[in-house]
Image (cartoon, rainbow, N blue to C red):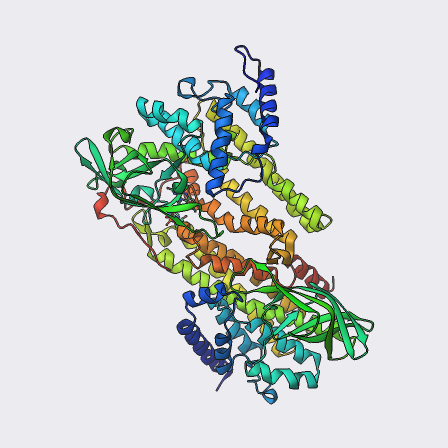
């Protein structure tokens, strides 16, 4: 294995990354997400990356990072471009939970968890959404009640991606129901294997089970697990949510993004193999996918530069989130256009039909997870463009008086 | 009794039956059976006079037109009940009627009306079957892909190329050299199969060389019928979305009070209303043998499919996370909508044919 030298140049670094990827290429590709196996692959990949001193390039060295520059990260991305990086299961931890701990966590929490997350030794999930509180996550009902120095948590979370393979979760719970909803929340680090935590997989419309229901029955959480301040959990949650948009849209520092093998390339290849590349209408569709994808890449790299330069990503986070979901849906529809009737019915060994029908089925999830399009547009309209907010009925009322959830169809 | 009342009665009785006998749990149960169908359901549809709805009275059917067929298709589109109605009672019956083959009609149609014969049709486009005269009748070779309910049908009708041009042939399920492979389908509530024929004996239906005309006329009718089914599904997802928007609370208010959600629902309504007039016009054009049927069928064929898919996708969005779960019915409609858009040629092909029909 090529080791860094103390005075490694940028070119030397680039060469080292290239060599490392070439050497470890067997770890990439052919990885299905959502299974326990995928997590294993992700953990091993991340550990290898870490041991090669290529993980957390721009993270502070004291928490296991490399303390390198944005230029190093860009060089890394460039060298990694042709590979499919199998770290999707770590995205929530690395892209969302870790930045939250960095910004809001205690020194002890950072020291205990960050390096381990970076090495893939700890996988994390995000325990925010509940049956009654999704877009309005501040309307959540899971209670955390003081018990001496500790807390006792009771309630239910839902749509928790990866809870079934996670070691820890970032939990948002209500610690004071007598104040307006945003003022009575607290964020905790919870051990997913603690007594009283029950995880039940939920089946998605794709047929896979990537997300779960998580039940908390009198779960004891130590006092030092509070992230940030008691009753100030909303501020911490906003940090997580901002990073979530960036992660989803721009691919969390190049770690979770499907590097290489973009949608356009796959579609063009599909059209070449299955016929249709000469069809002028299809060519137009393919070209528009290319444009969308290129724009998303440009947006993403700008966001990543901002993040690395220590600037809080601006509106691009929401723009990228929206654009990513739109691209996913558009590409899937074009995929089915190419497949034609073969996208409605196929023999079980037809990998193309499997891939593009799965993409079509997954597309609505892309749009909903991490904030729906409507919520993203509200954020853009109100926080970015400064348009007046809609009159709110829920902001100055104690939480207990609010109506939350419901819904039947 | 005026026609609208007849249609209204029919709708009420079909919906009543489907709501009581085929709730979502039953739809899912049937969809998950190995064959994806339940003979008891088909027998019940026969008892209700539905399998023979479009069969002429002379052959034991109700002799109804497309207006009535459209009503049933709409209701089935709402319910997603897996039953070979579209394949048998629409495609099968219409292919036999269009063929003008009195003997075949007399043999098969009464059995359809009685619910004893399920018919699948290998439509043109997806089939590459060749017919050659053998010593004791015709022999077929080739394959028909994506045949609706093809694996469970008792009789398969296929278009095949013969020396005199394309012709329609009938192949019983137990014919020698016939193999049927169930396919994986995007739509969980309607199966498709690949039908392969190897020197399979078949009976000519109609006259040799007339298959092109029959296929073209059948396609017009299939598009009109499918449009009705799409309208039914689109209407159902609209209702589902509106009900959820009314009763789901976020930020202390019903989500339907947010203009973004309200407008999403209104957009669905705009599409559904336009889809409905498109479908009705196409169905009426069949019943009146209107000269512009090919145009009306393609207006419906392109618009209704797109409207349905857009509505089904919107319905998932209105529901948020719950709409992305297997347990929620939203995806069953999303799957049906996209799948049915791909059934009888792509929207692009329909548009191209529309331009041709318009003389350009
Ligand atoms: C695949 C997937 C993975 C997920 N993973 C996680 C996870 O790991 N952790 C986690 O905590 N959560 C997760 N979620 C949950 C996700 O964050 C929520 O589903 C999402 O925020 C929407 O909430 P909801 O489902 O309750 O829908 P609702 O909030 O009820 O929304 C229903 C509809 O109302 C609209 N709406 C709501 N409020 C407004 C408004 N103010 N203005 C306009 N329209 C509005 C929405 O846009 C939507 O169309 C995941 C979801 C999915 C689909």
What residue is rendered at 50% in x and 70% in y? B76
Rendered image quadrant of residue B105: bottom right
Q: Is residue B348 above or below residue B39?
A: above
* Residue at left offset 61%, top offset 43%: A289
Measured from the top left, where is residue A115 in percent x and y? 41, 24
Front one among A128 and B242: A128
Residue A327 x %, y % = 55, 43
From this view, report whether residue A154 is shown above or below residue A101. below
Task: Describe residue A213's horizontal placement relative to residue B2 as left or right.
Answer: left
Most foreground residue, B180 or A371: B180
Residue B358 visible in the current orientation: no
Viewer can see residue A56: yes
Residue farthest bottom in this picture: B58
Quarter holding the C terminus of chain A is: bottom left
State the count of labels: 0
Residue ID at (58%, 24%): A20
Image height of A95 relative to A200, above or below: above
Residue furthest out toward the right: B163
Residue A251 in picture, x, y percent from top left: 50, 34
For image coordinates 69% across by 76% down, the residue present is B170
């Amino acid at each position: 294995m090529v080791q860094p030298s103390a005075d490694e140049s940028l070119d030397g670094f680039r060469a080292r990354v290239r060599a490392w990827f070439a050497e470890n290429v067997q770890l990439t590709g052919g990885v299905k997400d959502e299974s326990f196996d995928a997590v294993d692959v992700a953990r091993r990949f991340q550990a290898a990356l870490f041991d090669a001193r290529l993980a957390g390039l721009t993270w502070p060295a004291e928490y296991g990072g490399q303390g390198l520059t944005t230029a190093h990260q860009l060089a890394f991305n460039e060298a990694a471009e042709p590979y499919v990086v199998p770290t999707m299961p770590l995205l929530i931890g690395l892209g969302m939970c870790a930045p939250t701990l960095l910004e809001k966590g205690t020194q002890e929490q950072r020291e205990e968890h960050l390096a381990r997350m970076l090495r893939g030794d700890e996988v994390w999930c995000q325990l925010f959404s509940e049956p009654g509180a999704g877009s309005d996550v501040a309307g959540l009902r899971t209670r955390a009640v003081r018990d001496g120095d500790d807390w006792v948590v009771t309630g239910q979370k839902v749509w928790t991606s990866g809870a079934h393979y996670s070691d820890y979760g970032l939990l948002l719970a209500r610690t004071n129901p007598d104040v307006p909803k945003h003022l009575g929340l607290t964020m905790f680090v919870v051990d997913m294997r603690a007594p009283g935590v029950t995880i039940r997989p939920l089946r998605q419309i794709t047929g896979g089970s990537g997300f779960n229901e998580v039940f908390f029955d009198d779960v004891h959480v130590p006092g030092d697990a509070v992230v940030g301040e008691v009753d100030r959990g909303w501020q911490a949650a906003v940090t997580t949510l901002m990073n979530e948009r960036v992660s989803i849209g721009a691919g969390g520092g190049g770690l979770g993004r499907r590097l290489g093998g973009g949608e356009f390339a796959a579609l063009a290849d599909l059209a070449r193999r299955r016929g249709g590349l000469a069809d002028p209408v299809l060519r137009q569709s393919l070209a528009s996918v290319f444009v969308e994808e290129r724009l998303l890449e440009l947006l993403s790299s700008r966001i990543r530069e901002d993040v690395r330069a220590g600037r809080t990503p601006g509106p691009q986070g929401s723009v990228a989130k929206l654009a990513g979901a739109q691209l996913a849906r558009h590409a899937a529809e074009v995929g089915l256009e190419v497949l034609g009737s073969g996208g409605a019915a196929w023999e079980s060994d037809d990998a193309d039909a499997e891939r593009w029908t799965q993409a079509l089925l997954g597309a609505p999830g892309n749009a909903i997870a991490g904030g729906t399009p409507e919520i993203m547009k509200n954020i853009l309209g109100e926080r970015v463009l400064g348009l007046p907010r809609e009159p709110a009925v829920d902001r100055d009322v104690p939480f207990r008086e609010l109506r939350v959830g419901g819904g039947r169809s | 009794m005026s026609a609208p009342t007849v249609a209204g009665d029919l709708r009420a009785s079909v919906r009543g039956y489907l709501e009581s006998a085929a709730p979502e749990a039953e739809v899912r149960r049937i969809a998950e059976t190995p064959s994806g169908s339940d003979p008891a359901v088909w027998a019940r549809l026969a008892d209700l006079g539905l399998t023979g709805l479009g069969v002429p009275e002379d052959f034991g059917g109700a002799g109804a037109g497309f207006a009535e067929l459209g009503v049933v298709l709409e209701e089935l589109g709402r319910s997603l009940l897996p039953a070979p109605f579209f394949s048998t009672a629409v495609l099968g019956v219409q292919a036999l009627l269009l063929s003008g083959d009195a003997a075949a009609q007399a043999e098969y149609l009464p059995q359809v009306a009685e619910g004893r014969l399920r018919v699948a049709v290998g439509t043109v486009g997806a089939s590459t079957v060749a017919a050659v005269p053998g010593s004791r009748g015709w022999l077929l070779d080739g394959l028909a892909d994506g045949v609706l309910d093809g694996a469970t049908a008792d009789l398969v009708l296929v278009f095949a190329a013969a020396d005199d041009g394309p012709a329609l042939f009938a192949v019983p399920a137990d014919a020698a050299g016939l193999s049927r492979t169930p396919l994986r389908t995007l739509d969980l509530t309607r199966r498709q199969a690949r039908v392969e024929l190897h020197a399979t004996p078949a009976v000519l239906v109609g006259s040799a060389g007339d298959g092109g005309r029959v296929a073209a006329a059948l396609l017009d009718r299939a598009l009109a019928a499918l449009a009705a089914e799409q309208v039914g599904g689109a209407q159902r997802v609209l209702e589902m979305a509106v009900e959820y928007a009314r009763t789901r609370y976020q930020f202390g208010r019903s989500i339907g009070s947010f203009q973004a959600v309200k407008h999403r629902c209104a957009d669905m309504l705009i599409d559904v209303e336009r889809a409905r007039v498109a479908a009705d016009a196409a169905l009426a054009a069949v019943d009146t043998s209107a000269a512009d049927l090919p145009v009306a069928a393609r207006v419906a064929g392109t618009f209704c499919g797109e409207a349905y898919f857009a509505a089904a996708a919107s319905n998932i969005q209105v529901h948020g996370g719950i709409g992305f779960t297997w347990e929620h019915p939203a995806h069953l409609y999303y799957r049906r909508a996209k799948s049915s858009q791909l059934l009888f040629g792509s929207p692009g092909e329909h548009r191209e044919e529309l331009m041709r029909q318009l003389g350009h």
